[in-house]
Image (cartoon, rainbow, N blue to C red):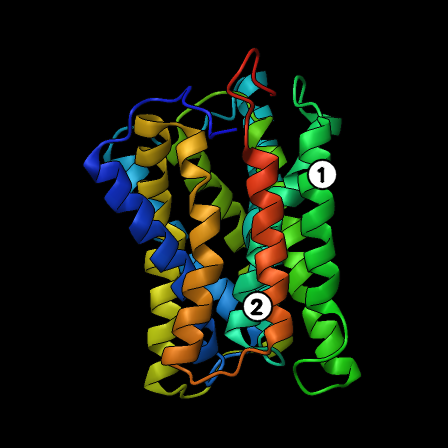
Amino acid sequence: MSFSTKRPAPTPLAWLLLFLLGLTWGGSFLGIAKALTGFGPLTIAAGRIGIAAVILAGIALASGKGLPPRSTPVGRRIWLHCLGMGVFSNALPFALLAWGQEQVSSGFAGITMAVVPLLVLPLAHVFVPGERMTPRKAAGFAIGFCGVVLLIGQGGESEGEAVGLARLACVAASCSYAVGAIITRLAPPGPTLSFGAAGLLVASAISIPLALCVEGWPASPPLPALVGVLYLGIFPTALATIALVYVVQSAGPSFMSLVNYQVPVWAVILGLVVLDEELPPQFLGALALILFGLVISQLRVSQGRADA
């Protein structure tokens, strides 16, 4: 068995951007930990979404791509998918992760992100034409699911109902990302940058008023918290979207999927080195199972017709 070679040859720039995307997304959990020193979870989600929306909308308008049209049936369908993407890929998971990290480590939250591509498998089987849940994919999903059970099971961090709910919130964020990925995949074709900007604008319209109503205006947050929110908005939310577009267009989505192996590893490393977090062996074992399941699900038989 080997990874499918049916994709454009990645350029050195694509490899560099893939590495930077893994590091940037892995560092988002460190950014959340810093932001939590001065902001509530809803405010963190609203802040990073608002900053990214301004950046991407500005770039989309300046480049001439603009926002998706609203005057045609297809344009209205695109905006409906933008709403789904804004909720499930931005507003909801950002808030859940920030809320969860009030109780669990950044390394734990990062590990749960390895679950996203596994959860996409059954959703794609149901909703995406041609995406079959083959025996190989089912085996990978089963192995990864065992890792999820180990990850949210008892042991590791200090016990308590709050910790258990926080763990479930991080896994729920992964589920939300998976739903958002399916909604995005089913969207009518169009400029990716415009779609991302529109999704963030919709997410801003939801998350900012909600954060102000629930948590109010933050009072004198410390500098590390401000830096954390700025980092989250500029790098893993806005600039990473631009890099993602280039990588997918130049090297293909299969190559882009390799970033799923990097994000949890970088989250764990940064949590250990920068935040001096302790990571129980249970969590490392769970990460190994999840990544192994992910490898199995993405392997393709090189002889004969490859699995879809």
How many neighbours does mark 2 have within 10 angstroms: few (below 14), some (14-19), or many (20 or more)? some
Q: Position of residue 236 (x, y in %)?
A: 38, 56
- Identify the residue at horizontal 41%, vertical 37% (top origin): 256
Residue type at mark 2?
A: Leu
Residue at 45% in and 34% down:
195
Decide: is 277 above or below 231.
Answer: below
The residue lying at 27 percent from left, 37 percent from top is 14
Kind of residue at disc 1: Ala
Q: Is residue 54 above or below residue 191?
A: below
Judge the density around disc 1: few (<14), some (14-19), many (≥20) Cα neighbours within 10 Å. Answer: some
Relative image position of residue 297 (x, y in whole percent)? 61, 36
Q: CA distance from mark 2 to mark 1?
A: 21 Å
Q: Which residue is mark 1?
A: 139
- Identify the secondary structure beneath mark 1: helix
Do the residues bearing badges 2 and 1 touch, measured as CB atoms within 8 Å? no
Residue that carries the numbered disc 2 in the rendered image:
284
* Secondary structure beneath label 2: helix
Q: Is residue 111 left or right of residue 8?
A: right
Q: Is residue 177 visible?
A: no
Q: Answer with the quarter of the image where residue 95 lies.
A: bottom right
Residue at 48%, 83% in the rendered image: 277
